[in-house]
Amino acid sequence: MDAGLVTDLLKQLGSFTADQQALQELQLPVGVDDEVKRLQHNLAVVQAMLSEVEERTLTDPAVKPWYDQLKDAYYMMDDLLDIWNTARIKSQIQKEEEVAEPADISTPAVRKTVCSFIPSPSCCFNLPMHHDVGGKIKTLNETLDMIINGMEKYGIDLNRQPEVVDRPITNFVGENEVFGLIDYKKVVLEMLLINSSEETNPLVISLVGMGSIGKSTFAQLVYNDSHVQFQFDKRMWVCVSDPFDPCKVAKAIIESIQGQSPDITELQSLLDNIFDLIVGKKFFLVLDDVWTEDSTMWEPFKNALKWGAQGSRILITTRNERVAKMMDSSYVINLPCQPLDISWQILRRMAFHDRHEALILKKMGHHMVKKCKGLPLAVKTLGSLLRFKSRREQWQMVLNSSLWEFEDIEKGFLAPLLLSYYDLPSPLKQCFSYCAILPKDYLFSIDELILHWMAQGYIESKEDIEMEILAEEYFKILAMRCFFQDFEKNEDDNDKIISCKMHDIVHDFAQSMTHDLCFTIEGDEKVEIDFKKARQLSLIVKETIPEFVYDANNLRFLNLILLSSHTIPPKLFNHLTCLRTLQLEGKSILELPNEVEKLIHLRLLKLSCVNIKELPETMCNFLNLQSLDVRGCNELVKLPRGMSKLINLRHLLLDKKCGIKSFSKGIGRLTCLRTLTYFSVGGESDEICKMGELENLNHIQGSLRIQGLKNVVDLGEVKRAQLKKKIRLSVLLLHFDMVDEETEDRRGRRVEKDVSVLNALVPHPDLKDLTIGEYMGTTVCPNWMMSLTKLKRFVLHWCPNLECLPPLGKLPFLESLEILHADSLKKVGDEFLGIEPKGKNMKDDVIFPKLKYLDFQYLQNWEEWTGMGVREEEDGDTGFVTNPIKIMPNLELHSLIIEHCPKLKSLPDFLKIRADERGTGEEWPKISHIPNIRIGYEYVQRKALSLS
């Protein structure tokens, strides 16, 4: 906590005292107003703190209890203000409903029904409100008085101003560069690629080195080498870590091959599965970060993996040479620390903007590099810190910092992390520390991480900038500070990071900063921890929920995973009323108890792999809820009728596997929504959500799947949806749904209606990804199709009446095109390319200028693909001339897939396809009769082309 957090509290306190009418309605006692003003004064005194305070807890143990009291006071104040705001929201909704309801239903009985989804004051406060609020404010004032006295006692400087960071943020240094280890790459590649009939199979190679030396980064460099990719049939990457969990490792190996984790829990069955997947296949397996020295753990894997083809390889990274010996390594490579000149090269690239700065500060830089002891990650972390410090005195302060005394060579490095951490503003410290609750080697989804940060209150709400955008900026700063790594970036926007990981040493550091607040517990473990001050808990329950959980009354984050068949005890929610984030996982979870309504502070509710069919109406008491994530709840068929009460909801995350057929009326009131991944169109009933409910949801962004368009009754509702105003939508999926029509007349009406609905939808022209499915029209060419000039991907599937393709060749940025399951399609010709009739000047036309991926599947009656890319044009002087049209100017696609098209006779001449040099194998007979197929070694994509 720092001045920024205190300022936010003061703003809320200002609204608390300014709303005198609300104070009177809540019947607060005389004198509370004076207490609140005194509380404002006390908080203003504390406003100047407090990065200095937190850092002093490290060097002065006597400060720690005082600082903990300050944090507790903040959490108490935050909860109190949240209760106040919740009550105000409740009052506002009740007034709106009373105005909207007819006078003849204003009897007490009816009023109770109308407001049944809103918590009563006693629910919000647990005690009569006037006693609870007044008592808590008085207690907080007494606590803050004591804290202020503590500041004077410990000599805290309240006038110290935080340093303003005005240095521009530069681009990331390439994280795949492994300075000083290039010679080792050549050696390891020879071991991987050169086979000997006398070698053991699989051959085991171990990379040994201290933490943060760059073992994993080096292994990734080898793993992604093009020669390695081509040499092996199967490549697998598994993060092992400590403790060694055989089932987890086995599942990770299978997932690395199949793309999904198996639903198997017994180790031998998993090993049998591995055997089936690798038997006779030449594989390359990386086991990253192995710690266990117990050979009995490794033996079952050794027996399963020996059945791979000769030449298979296993590459291990470990800090312990005894591990390499235990795994019978044929080669052990000890990676050295970086020499001083290489370390200086890393620091210079990270820290300096120009050569002049490097010359001026070089001497101090050399001194600091020596302190990093040749560890690349330590140097990068230090360099990322110094990037924001341009003055000599700033560098001198870093060099002279007492935090260098905390260096711990056994953990790899500590001082650079401490220096970088304490240089952050408080909200960024909180965002970083939050990651401690997630497992090691966890793949962070950036979007999901942002939702968690918001739920915990780490992101300020500003009028001129959205929380999500501010949180993304926070992430970028932390990434620039080297707190994250292994970035996966968006293909369409290389500046946007989709996911990342955290180095295990950085994760250890995050846990050390939250050791008394954040816990991960196996349910059957014996624990001797006082959970009364715990704020974050991840609990895996194998039998029953342990009793100590009920003592954790101050939890703000709970991740509860039920491995047994036990349900959630209702009393859990009687105790954990401070929760901001609740994650539940377990197939035995069939319902949420009504007591969940007591979680009035809740901002994020995530349900994973649960078998809930309906969410309780009482969850509409979550008036502060920002994010509801029910992806993976495949049994879910119904959302609460009172969803319209959740006026602070910003993200509603569902997926296509859920069975929700319609939404209740009123979702259009949720005008704060930023994410609406799934929307189901209702039918004629007045109680069911219509398309028009989307009208005012103009903040939604990302991806939206609209299901059930066949249910549209009124085209006016479709036009009211105003999809063209959803300028932040980049992905749109339009699904009409398949039905078995009984008569020709009904089928004809369905065809006509689908065409009318599609024409009326009109998305924003900046759309990048469009899918149309279960559509019954004979053509797909709405009047808005050619306006999608930024469209990159188009999918058309399950369109049984489709006879003609739209002129997609005219879309200038289309990269990927999929046409699937269109049984009425018999011919594809010039209309598909968008070629104009003869006689029209089209000399500058380029057809499919960006197309890379073309996929035709399950077109059972497709016979002809014509269109030669040549046309005769009339010239005024010489008569008719032949003018070629440029089609796919790159001459070849990255991928062309044609499957289950049994009647197709040939490909058009303009397709210049190179088959894989291994195409002479079993796939070659399927395509060898088609003209213009050329074989080239450089076309190494092995899933090239097939006709069946």
Image (tube, helix red, strand yellow):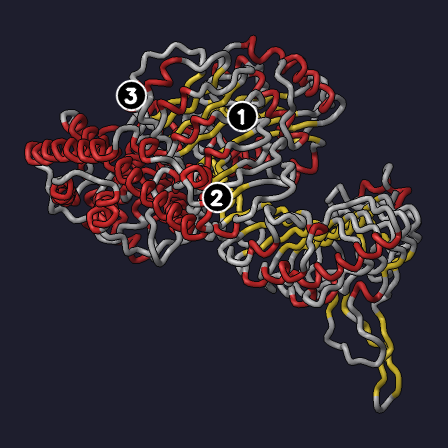
Which label lies toward us, 3 or 2? 3
Q: The disc labelled 3 sits on which kind of residue?
A: Lys
Residue 691: quadrant of the picture: bottom right
Q: Is residue 659 left or right of residue 458?
A: right
Q: How many marks?
A: 3
The residue singled out by tag 1 in the image is 591
Q: Is residue 905 left or right of residue 639?
A: right
- Residue 346 place in picture, x, y as percent: 39, 44
Q: Is residue 769 left or right of residue 578?
A: right
Q: The disc labelled 1 sits on which kind of residue?
A: Glu
Q: Nearer the viewer, residue 504 or 746?
A: 746
Q: Is residue 673 above or below residue 847?
A: above
Q: Is residue 79 above or below residue 566?
A: below
- Residue 758 place in picture, x, y as percent: 71, 59
The residue singled out by tag 3 in the image is 532
- Kind of element beneath mark 1: loop
Q: Residues within 10 Å of mark 2 (few under 14, many from 20)?
A: some
Which label lies toward us, 1 or 3? 1
User: Would you say residue 200 is visible in this rendering?
Assistant: no
Q: Residue visible at 42% across and 31% down?
A: 597
The numbered disc on residue 447 is: 2
CA distance separating discs 1 and 2? 27 Å
- Residue 556 place in picture, x, y as percent: 35, 31
CA distance separating discs 3 and 2? 31 Å
Q: Residue visible at 84% across and 81% down?
A: 839
Q: Quadrant of the C terminus?
A: top right
